[in-house]
Image (cartoon, helix red, strand yellow):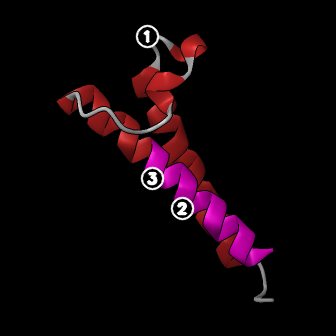
Amino acid sequence: MKQLLEFLGFIALVQGVAGLVHEFTDWDWGLVQRIDFLDGFEIYASVALLVLAFALFAAAESRKSG
């Protein structure tokens, strides 16, 4: 379970960073800008993904290994 939480946290972290990089540099990568209902809220969604990533990492740390 700990490894799953860490993996999901890593995916959320990468997508959050990708969304912010896309907003500030116009590089076309990441999934946040491709979701239609988030149109206009990409920065908020990216920040929310970063917060989710850190929460998942904290939850993974609180779990026992294995």
Above or below residue 64? Residue 11 is above
Q: What whole-number distance in Å separates the C-alpha atoms at marks 1 and 3?
A: 20 Å
The residue under label 3 is: 14
Give residue 26's position: percent from left, percent from top.
22, 27
Stretch in magenta: 1-15
Q: What whole-number distance in Å separates the C-alpha atoms at marks 1 and 2?
A: 25 Å
Mark 1 is on which residue type? Answer: Gly
- What secondary structure prevails in the magenta region? helix
Q: Nearer the viewer, residue 63 or 41?
A: 41
Instruction: Quadrant for residue 43, please give it.
Output: top left
Q: What whole-number distance in Å separates the C-alpha atoms at marks 2 and 3?
A: 6 Å
Picture quarter with the C terminus:
bottom right
The residue under label 1 is: 40
Residue at horizontal 62 percent and vertical 56 percent from the top? 55
Residue at horizontal 33 percent and vertical 36 percent from the top? 20
Residue 34 is a magenta residue: no
Above or below residue 39? Residue 59 is below
Give residue 57's position: percent from left, percent from top.
60, 66
Identify the disc placed on residue 9. none
Q: Residue furthest front?
A: 28
Disc 2 to disc 3: CB gap under 8 Å: yes
The residue under label 2 is: 10
